[in-house]
Image (tube, rainbow, N blue to C red):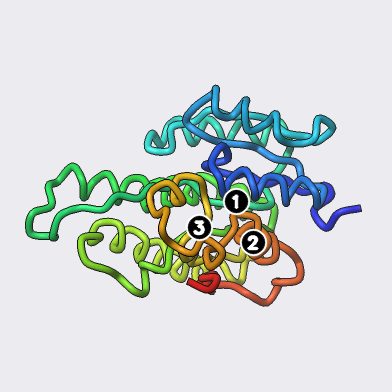
Amino acid sequence: MGQFNDRTALVTGAAGNLGGALCAALVAEGAKIAMLDISSEALVKARATLPDAAEIELFPTDLLVCDEIERTVTAVKGRFGRIDILANVAGGFAMGPPLHETDDATWDRMLDLNLRSVFYCCRAVVPVMLEQGQGSIVNVSARAALMPKANMGPYCASKAGVVALTESLAQEHKQAGIRVNAILPGTVDTPENRAAMPDQDHSRWVPPAALADVMVFLASDAASCVTGAAVPVYGRS
């Protein structure tokens, strides 16, 4: 028996490295999973890595189209009856020039991928959780939200926005049984990061499974008194 038996988790970016690790961790704890990603093909591949017996549905969704998100949330509730956990994993990263040379497209892309997507998903799911009288939201920010670096202005601003949104939403709903927290990953040990930084000590980085463990904790009853937190998960880097 897992700690999330009879609970449903909606996971965005579910076909990615962290999203896939989180889905695996949630399934291991008995959760039903709504896997969201923009690519149907990627979702099918990600689903194939999870146990056949797990209760999982795939929902290809563009997180920058609010009508699509609303339809997906309605479909998830119709399929599972409830949404107990919202994990906002989807996002993106891009280095850039100095801020004074940054174009609007780069700024908009980072704010859209990392902050607008979280806003849209929270706006759609919170009413479901309010109706239930409980729920847990776990957002993915980044160490760069607290320790910005040069040539990363739009990314750092977007991830700092996730922390502020998390804290504000936690205050809005702390009396309604809805907890809202965020994690702040350091460098994540993914194939893409290894390819981009081959000379780094990868053993110091954070495995996606370790991040998933922290997210599972924040979503669980063990963290029932934790809301509005931004939890650093930096590994040894």
Q: Which residue is mark 2?
A: 210
Q: Position of residue 94 (x, y in %)?
A: 29, 49
- Camera-side residue of 228 and 20: 20
Q: Position of residue 146 (x, y in %)?
A: 37, 74
Residue depth check, mark 1 versus mark 2: number of the one nearer the observer = 2
Sequence order check, earlier mark of 3 and 2: 3
Residue 82 screen position, x and y as percent: 70, 43
From the viewer's side, name the closer residue of 192 and 208: 192
At numbered mark 1, what does the secondary structure look like: helix, strand or loop?
strand
Residue 188 bears which disc, if any?
A: 3
**Residue at the extreme right:** 1
For this view, does 138 lie left or right of residue 209? left
* Label 3 SS: loop
Q: Residue at x 49, y 27 (%)?
A: 39
Crowd tier of the residue under label 2, counting other residues whose Cα lies within 10 Å: few below 14, some 14–19, many 20 or above? some
Residue 86 is tagged as 1
